[in-house]
Every structure is written in structure tokens, then in C-alpha cells.
Amino acid sequence: MSRPQSIPSRWKQLQSNVVNCSHCPRLIDHCKAVAQKKRRAYENEAYWGKPVPDFGSPRVGLLIVGLAPGAHGANRTGRMFTGDRSGDWLYRAMHRVGFANQEKSIDAQDGLKLVDCAITNICRCAPPQNKPSTEELKNCSPYFAETLELCDPIVVLALGGLAWNATLRELVRVGWFNRPPRRPKFGHGEKVSLNNNRFLLGSYHPSQQNTFTGKLTKPMLDRVFKNALKLINQNRPETE
């Protein structure tokens, strides 16, 4: 009888499976096409151009869930929320509250490390017009389910309405949330209590559309991360 894989081994295998995934030809082709037709500012850089793995380690207090890699951000750098303005906003806020060791997020070799946190996306490939199809999200859902299991977070933070709805569906499917008569609505700062002293929080996505217009401000994002930290500290098992 073979021994069960350790959590770090399963985490490493999950990331390898993600990077080598070919379930969605439209997305794979798009990632490669963007990598070949580079943005002028990055024309001398080698693009990642593949599905993007999770960033961080398993067994964390906070799991951040985004929609999909940016075409010239994570699809270029190979790391979640790295190399674009959404990531700049996100990591600065995380650093202010203590979930990241620095605010700089330039490339995968910039020294950024997460603290008691991991980051994932409900879609691991950069989709055309930033809109993955229902079938493509379904293809990615087993990766998301395994990320949830291996990270085992106290708080799940969904960035944006699409990530919120997809996360809720997965939380119900894996038994972390009992389906209510009405699905909890997304909103910035919303909190949903999950099973076993876990929580789902919502935040507007730190996209340029939200940050340039003032829909999402630094104090608003800081409050969400401070709330996440408070919930983690209050609900972390004493044995840890």
C-alpha cells in the first residue's frame, strides 16, 4: 500500500497540474497569443503565457480569490496579481496589514513573500475580454476545490462579484457552506459565516476601473484586510 502524499507534496503536484493543464483550448491559445503579441512596454521580456499556479503555501489563515490572470500581468510574469496595477494596489494593502513582506510586486523574482496567506483565481488562464465561459470555470473548479482543501483557510476573501459567486458555489459543493434559501449578495465588506468557524469576505476588485474612479479606496481595502486579520486571530485553533 502506497503512503498518502504529504500536504506540501500535494501542493507542489497541484501547481504542476495547473501549469500543464490543457482543458480549455480557447484560453490556452489566448495566453500564447498574448505572449507572442506583447505590449510594447514589455516587448523585450519573455512572457509566461500559460496557466498561472497559486501563489503562497498551504495551511494559511487567509485565501484570496480573484477572477483570472491579467493578460499583461500574471500571464506575463507567471505569478498571481504581479506586474499590473491591480497587483500594485493589492500587495500594498496586504503589506500595510502584514500579509506580505513588501509592497513591491514587479516579477516572480522580486523577493515578495506572503505571510499566512495564499492567492488563487477561479480561472487560471487569462481569458479574452477578461470573461471566462461557464464551461471554462467548471473545468477549473477541481483546482479551486483542491486549493481550498490544502490551504484550509479561516477566511476566504473574494475580489469582485464573479469571484464571490463562484466561491460560494464551490464552498457549498465542498461542504463548507450550507446552501441558504437566498444566495448571499456580493458587496464590499460583506461577511458570511461558514461552517467550522470559517468566513467569506467580499471586496471590490482592485482593478483600475474601481481604483481610478474611487469606487475602491485605500481605506476601504485596508478595512477588509484588517477585518480578515481580526477574524483569523479570533478563530485560529489554540493548538496551532
Image (tube, rainbow, N blue to C red):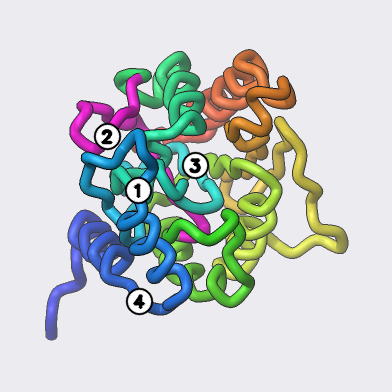
CB under 8 Å between discs 2 and 1: no
Q: Earlier in the sequence, mark 3 or mark 2?
A: 3
Whether residue 199 is visible to the viewer of this picture, yes or no, is no
**What segment carries the magenta color?**
104-123
Q: Which mark is residue 107?
A: 2
Q: Nearer the viewer, residue 58 or 202?
A: 202
Position in image of residue 37 (x %, y %): 36, 54
* Disc 1 element: loop
Q: Taking 107 as reference, is 211 left or right?
A: right
Query: Can you tell which of label 1 and label 4 is closer to the viewer?
Result: 1
Position in image of residue 127 (x %, y %): 51, 60
Q: Which mark is residue 212?
A: none
Q: Earlier in the sequence, mark 4 or mark 3?
A: 4
* Disc 4 element: loop
- Residues at marks 2 and 1, CA–CA distance in whole angstroms: 16 Å
The residue tagged 1 is: 38
Q: Which quadrant does the C terminus fall into?
A: top left
Position in image of residue 78 (x %, y %): 29, 48
Classify 191 as above or below 52: above
Q: Amino acid at mark 2?
A: Asp
As drawn, the residue found furthest toward the left would be 2
- Residues at marks 4 and 3, CA–CA distance in whole angstroms: 24 Å
Q: Amino acid at mark 4?
A: Ser
Query: Can you tell which of label 1 and label 3 is closer to the viewer?
Result: 1
Q: Earlier in the sequence, mark 4 or mark 2?
A: 4
Q: Amino acid at mark 3?
A: Ile
Position in image of residue 118 (x %, y %): 38, 42
The residue tagged 4 is: 22
- Residues at marks 4 and 2, CA–CA distance in whole angstroms: 24 Å
- Residues at marks 3 and 2, CA–CA distance in whole angstroms: 19 Å
Q: Earlier in the sequence, mark 1 or mark 3?
A: 1
Classify 151 as above or below 96: below
